[in-house]
Amino acid sequence: MIIPTLVQLSSRVLGKYFLSIESFRYIPDEFVENIFDSYLKMNSSLSIISQEDMIRIVKVLTDYHGDLFCTSFSYIIANHLNILTSNFYFHLFKCVHRNLVQLDFSHALEKYTLEEKEQFLNIFGQMETIEYLRLTYNRLDDDDIRLLTASHRIQSKALCNLHSLHLQGNHLTSRSARFLKSLTTLDTLYISLASLHDKSEFVREFDNLYECICSVQNSWEEIINRGWIGKIPQLQSSNASGDNSFYRKRRRVDNDDSIALIKLVRHCSTCQPNSLKKTMKKTEKIISNPIGFIDSNMLSSKSFSLVRLNQSTHLFRRSFFNQTYINGQWVSSQTGETFKVYNPANGEEVGSVPNCNTQDAEKAIQAAYDAFQNKWSTKTGKERSVIMRKFNDLILKNKDHLAKILTTEMGKPVKEAAGEIVYGASYIEWFAEEAKRIHGDVLPVGIANRRSFVLRQPIGVCGFITPWNFPSSMILRKAGPALAAGCTIVVKPAEDTPYSCLALCDLAKEAGFPDGTLNVLTSTRSAEIGKFLCEHPLISKMSFTGSTEVGKKIMAMCASTVKKISLELGGNAPFIVFNSADVKQAVQGAMASKFRASGQTCVCANRILVQDGIYDEFVAEFTKKAKAQIVGDGQDERTHLGPVINKDQYERIIDFIDDAKKQGARIVTGGNEKKGKESGFFIQPTVVADVKLSMLVAKEEIFGPIAALIKFKTEDEAIKIANSVDVGLAGYFYSQDLSQIWRVAERLQTGMVGINEGLISSVEAPFGGIKQSGFGREGSKYGIDDYVNMKYLCMGGLKDVDRSSQ
């Protein structure tokens, strides 16, 4: 193709080729950045580009490559501004200030006269979308601060989205501190090589924030070993060499690599100087984790970056790191009580969230009811669809951040977590389209002067109780049809994994859902909150995913108000491999089904039944694959299996293994905890052969990385074993015999059947079970039925045409 070839050409040829500035409009987005950079490098060095040409280029770029310009190109231009005057800045801002996300000044403000600064700040005050501001080697004197403060005060929208401020080589005063404190949305502050006019006054204005910086900065070089730091991934942003990758991000500053430093700062803020070494020793394990960073440039440049506790990814903002989401607001519980959330991979505290009670639940339900009556259900299907599609786009755009949040609190490998995010988003995308297709019906009538119709209307406020094993997708799979129908939602997420739910609400707010459409009750009071939701008269529908035992209680409690309910309960999935099966294909399917999420899925292969003719071959091949699985922290991209969710689940799985051993089962591989992972709930992938039906691994849902292998002789025997349990969510079998495929598929007593396939769930298919696995279906064209009421309309008294005069 011609465009990739152009990127390879010399900058002189590029400059000559693109002498026509209008040519930039025809370049695809994916190539224009490199070409533009080369164009500026050559022309600026030859001094053949004029300000007028630059302004024309800016206009073309903003008109035809707006989003890219607001992120990447603004930094590229900043690298070549030595040939431009302050007048160019004004033209630049006039073109882009409505969409500009980031702004970078290098020696810029100090060039301006006071009059020019005032002119600039009039434009600066209109920047509604600016999210990061970098001021490098600007004096930032009292005149600057006075004007910045005035702009911020007079223009109500100015800097209203500013999340990140980087000050490098600046002269700071107490007025600077007061201005910084006035930026209420500021989450991330970088101060490097700054000189202080009045340190004591600055410290007083900045409270503990600057003291924390001082305490670490003054002792940093003494405590940290240079070689140790060199092994840790560096954050390129604080490198003064000019690497611009950090500033070419599309959205807010990426602080994914800062979790360790955050915890370090939190510890140091409460430490006395003589205890700092002890704190660092405690923190070493955290920082040596691959997701941690310390920039080695800190040692030589004496710079220091402070990232607040709620910034472990850009989604971990102040808003939901320690609050819940009710009526469009981030709030604490009525009592102020909180509970802690832990990382199952290392036992470290992730954070704390409100421990809501029934008072909070009442507030959430009332907000949801008001939103249903007056805001969400009154929108047309198309209007709801637009907001839902934006929500889907935001989820996918923030997929990596959401995945890291999920992995941090739940433990599954980050690649698997990213897959869950995409899977969950597919339900929002699917039902965004279904929102426009909630059709009614016109019925045939038996009486001539009547007409009959059927309307499908949203059921009302829906209560969701969701599990920890899929903390994002289980919410989105329920929310998709509910929101499409026009319902509003109150969610009680699992106490182990609240942040995935809260992060989704953060994006939902950005997408434009009306206040009260989504509400979250984070709580350890599961029974109390669950009972309150089930019995509340304003809740019209309950949807629960969890154990059969709890599902029965939900069903009983909903009876008092005769609610519509959906239950997706326990499973004990049979995975049958017949003699005619392709063994390697069957092993691959069994591995995917069994060990996904460390076996903590309701549809995973719980009992693997293998026909005697291929039993030994299957055991050998399956064991080989199981041994190759890498167990570890889900943040490590090499990991296949993360930890199980908590201590109770860990001990339950160990009990299952011990029971199998006592009853004579053969432990082919695994069978114990993962050595060297004392702080996490790790269990090796375990293959248990020659399993008897009396063993716990055959009778109960395991919910862990244990593969129970059972030998059978005939098809009838396999079907009998498969159907012998009280639940019937999913079943799988592998066979190449077409007649057998039809027989077995129809005889299995499950709501879903995988035929020569180990992963069967998709948005296009109805998800749900039979027997004591529950009822109701999620996904597909049938999914919306659970969230609408059918209303019959009969119109009578219609007069026929008087034909007597004809």
Image (spheres, rainbow, N blue to C red):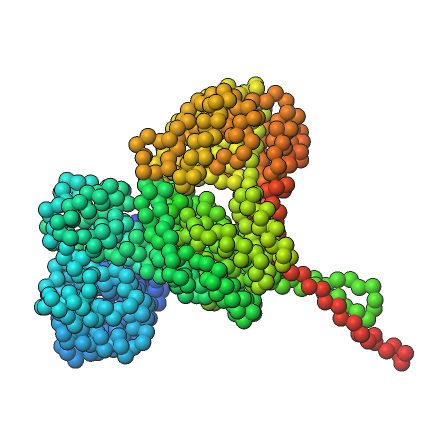
Residue 378: x percent and y percent? Answer: 56, 69
Q: Is residue 565 visible?
A: yes
Residue 66: x percent and y percent? Answer: 34, 64
* Residue visible at 10% across and 46% down in the picture: 222
Q: Is residue 7 visible?
A: no
* Residue visible at 25% across and 50% down in the picture: 263
Q: Is residue 570 left or right of residue 265?
A: right
Q: Quadrant of residue 712?
A: top right
Residue 401: x percent and y percent? Answer: 36, 51
Q: Is residue 596 left or right of residue 29?
A: right
Q: Quadrant of residue 120?
A: bottom left
* Residue visible at 26% across and 57% down in the picture: 308
Q: Is residue 698 above or below residue 328?
A: above
Residue 498: x percent and y percent? Answer: 41, 52
Compare residues 569 and 230 and report the one nearer the observer: 569
Compare residues 722 and 390 and report the one nearer the observer: 722
Q: Is residue 228 above or below residue 85?
A: above
Tell how many labels: 0
Quadrant for the C terminus in the image: bottom right
Q: Is residue 218 left or right of residue 587?
A: left
Compare residues 356 and 319 and report the one nearer the observer: 356
Q: Quadrant of residue 626?
A: top left
* Residue visible at 24% across and 41% down in the picture: 285
Compare residues 5 and 502 and report the one nearer the observer: 502
